[in-house]
Amino acid sequence: MRYIVSLIFCITLIPALVAQDAGHPLAHKDLQAQQKWVDSIYNKMSLDEKVGQLFMVRAFSDAEKSNQSAVAELINNYHIGGLIFSTGGPIAQAKQNNLYQAISKTPLLIGMDAEWGLSMRLDSTYAFPYNMTLGAITDNKLVERTGYHIGEHSKRIGVHFNFAPVVDINTNPKNPIIGNRSFGEDRDNVTEKGLAFMKGMQDAGVLANAKHFPGHGDTDSDSHKTLPTINFSEKRIDSIELYPYRKLIKDGLSSVMVAHLNVPSLEPRDGFPSSLSRHIVTDILKDTLGFRGLIFTDALEMKGVSNYSKPGDIDLAALKAGNDVLLISEDVPTAIAKIIEAYNTKDISEERLAHSVKKILMAKFKVGLDNYEPIGTATLVGDLNRLQDDLLYEELMEASTTVLKNKGNILPLRNLETKKIAYVELGDSSGSTFYDELKKYTKVHLVKADLLNEMITKLQNYNTVVVGFHKKNDHPWQAYKFTDKELVWLYEIARTNTVILDVFARPYALIDLVTIENIESIVMSYQNSDISQKKSAQVVFGGIAAKGTIPVSLGEHFKVGDGIQYTALQSLSYGLPESVGMSSKRLERLDSIAQYAVDQKMTPGIQLLVARKGKVIYNKNFGKHTYKGEEDVKFEDMYDVASLTKILATLPLLMELEEKKVLSLNTKLSTILPDFAKTNKKNVTIKQMLSHYARLKPWVPFYVATLDSTTGKPDPKYYRRTATSQFSIKVADQMYLRKDYPDTIQKIIRDTDMLSSQRYRYSDLPYYILKKYIEGYYKKPLDELAQEHFYQSLGANYTTYNPSSQFSDRNLIPTEVDDYFRFKEVHGYVHDMGAAMQNGVGGHAGVFSNANDVAKIMQMYLQKGFYGGKRYLKPETVDKFNFCYYCDKNVRRGIGFDKPQLGDVGPTCGCLSMKSFGHSGFTGTYAWADPDEEIVYIFLANRTYPKAGKNRLLKENIRTEIQRLIYEAIIVEEDIESVVTKIVD
């Protein structure tokens, strides 16, 4: 009967115990199974094995520091409970982990310091931004995702505890050990970030560890080297330093690390380390804060505690204080012996030992060590360096970059036509990525000088100076201050120039600035990584918004939380395909098509760019300038874009005039050019001729009439080898055309016959005509008008007519070895003969550009005439010109713009919207924009080199096949569901 009563009592008690532990931070969802496993393992352990579980020993996976045999001995002979891996590499660590787990009777709990990712300790692994950078982000969901990603990496390499997040509130700028490792100095911000990071990591299945209790943020010494003192009242510590712990504990924090600190207000014994204080560990952390998770000491080898007492005595004192796990003991065998001796003398009770050991075993069950599986290494490095990590990193840097000062609202930089921008680099690290990204937006010159007066003199040529302060980004303890020389240079540059200071270092660097009065704008970019540099440049020019707020106060200059937000200007930004719903993997197929075209000698080189939703996501170069040359195609190289000139120069100028009601689409030639009043073209409208539905001849070889009929060479009647007042039109080097010949060209056009019937027939002649009209209306040449109205303010500084007068030939792609007109290599001047005979400036040809600049203009069209904070054209104007008025006549064209085919054959892949528009050029160029998918596609080539011949790019559908692959790279809903399913699984 007594047995039955006891059994009923036990059965009744079990649910109560389960319910009691359900809120335990180490509780598994199957709590009964967890308790059964814990009790089973514990009850089978000898005293030596139980005590051994308390120790977590450091292991190295790098060859030079490898302590493999010593660790194996501690596992075999002393039954240690866990390892904390330090420096090394992922493959070596995984192999060692598998070895150690195989020889351990009880599975090992694996810990690691991975505050900003595994790269804190391991090579070939991912580095996320430091906590200080994350502290600048206002969207805590991004911080949660960071914790989740780091958790995924940790779990993949077999780590169960990540000793993160750091929740120290860094109120002391001189703190030598925390600094960038803290989320900042505001307790609420630190707490919110810590909670988000913890939640993300624990959702990934890795246990979090808040450190360094009771708070290491306001010290000016390093506990690795000495015992720092925290001289605050108990009230202050409770309201500030302990605040994050209180919140994290409430939300399920798995573990806490206790620091080695001297805290007189909490521990009366002078110089007594907090990690050994029962009042701090047990009375405050466990009892007052109600923490039930695992309590780790900070490393017991650190001078902050090791100077206090002897090895073994320290470990015993730490256990008696209330710690569960003794981290990196100086002498494990001695410490174990000391604890066993204390146990045998009743100084440590069975209940006390079981309390800690069972918590350790609970943690082991929670992370799956009841069913341990070795770590696979086949895909390990790739799994730890994923595309989604890069995507997140980009988002983090976009969200953190902080504009602290913006006098006169000069940021984001606008009105680029008025700007002459210099870039000056300070610091001990490279800012080349930042500089390259700045140059994508407009002309920016790198200015260097050995002497300050030399620098000041050079900067007199500029009205805006971007000063980049770049410090090494290897680790968060990196030196971050300006040198005295750099401060002098900065003050003097700012005194005489409009300055934007961009700091790629710890924020505290700004404290050393005595004054910021003369610095118009200050941007805090926090770290000097490539992505940070790219995103900061994009913030400067308004490609992306400014979102960050400073997480610490900076002397008298800025207070915590300062940050000036502004929206993007709708300029192009730059980033990864997946950020706009495209697949990087699928876009790689573009590489093979482009390389095939180069290898098959369809063109010597290619610039290829894809943008979506205002972001350039693919921008690559292929091949060389010529087949026999050694000059690789570079981003800043400029191609003769041929007929793209029509929509890049002439058409936008005409659109301006139309929306100003200077003319309309139905205006006749005789109205705008009286010379046509008595010709067969007098009734041709602008709509007809720009739709190529005006019975105009496709092409007139104007140059033929200027060749000697006998020799076939340029006739001296029309050409001279040197320029004179009468022969001033430069056709090529040492070839100058008679200055009145453009008038002859216009007369030839007026006098040419019309086609016999009205049908679609592509023609260059409308653009000769419109060039004449536009230049007459403005009393300025077309090239100057295009610059003044569009290119300069767009920042299209690589877009111009006659580039050889402004750029080195090394950046100009040759187009042909001419053996029929100029009889020389066409390099640096226009390929089209008619444009060459107009001093290189044709309405139909003559513009040189690079892919990035062409994309700006196409993006302006895609955004209905708006770009970079400026409206160039009204939306209704763009719509009016991007319309097919004669589709019913089987004419696909818009007004100036080419449009998709009406049947099976045409200028596109046939896989995009009829709203799309673009153009192609004789030299192999192609530009297309699609409003429906918000895609811009640019293909620049010199397929005419060395001979124009057959257009194999067209014959083999290279450009349209690439276009098809671009559209196949769009991630559709089914793809997203597949990715989500994979992540969840």
Image (cartoon, grey):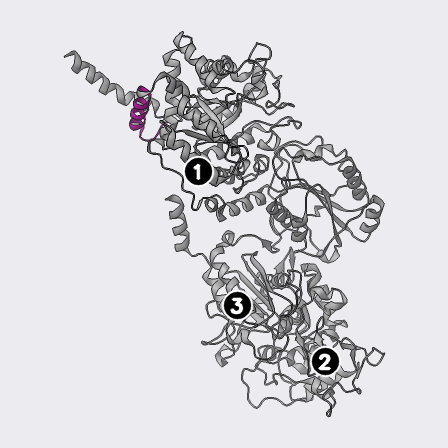
Based on the displayed image, in which of its 4 quarters is residue 261 positioned?
top right
**Residue 873 higher or lower than 838, as above or below:** above
Pointer 2 residue:
822
Horizontal and vertical percent position of residue 424? 74, 47
**Comes first in the chain, label 3 or label 1:** 1
> In the rendered image, which quarter contains the N terminus?
top left
- Residue 41 magenta-drawn? yes
> In the rendered image, which quarter contains the C terminus?
top left
Q: Residues within 10 Å of mark 2 (few under 14, many from 20)?
A: many
Q: Secondary structure at mark 1?
A: helix
**Comes first in the chain, label 2 or label 1:** 1
Pointer 3 residue:
596
Task: Identify the magenta region.
Answer: 26-43
Kindly give the residue lying farthest to the front in the view shown: 69
Can the viewer see residue 582?
no
Cα–Cα span, label 3 and label 1: 42 Å
- Residue 701 magenta-drawn? no
Q: What's the amino acid at mark 2?
A: Arg
Pointer 1 residue:
95
Q: What's the amino acid at mark 3?
A: Tyr
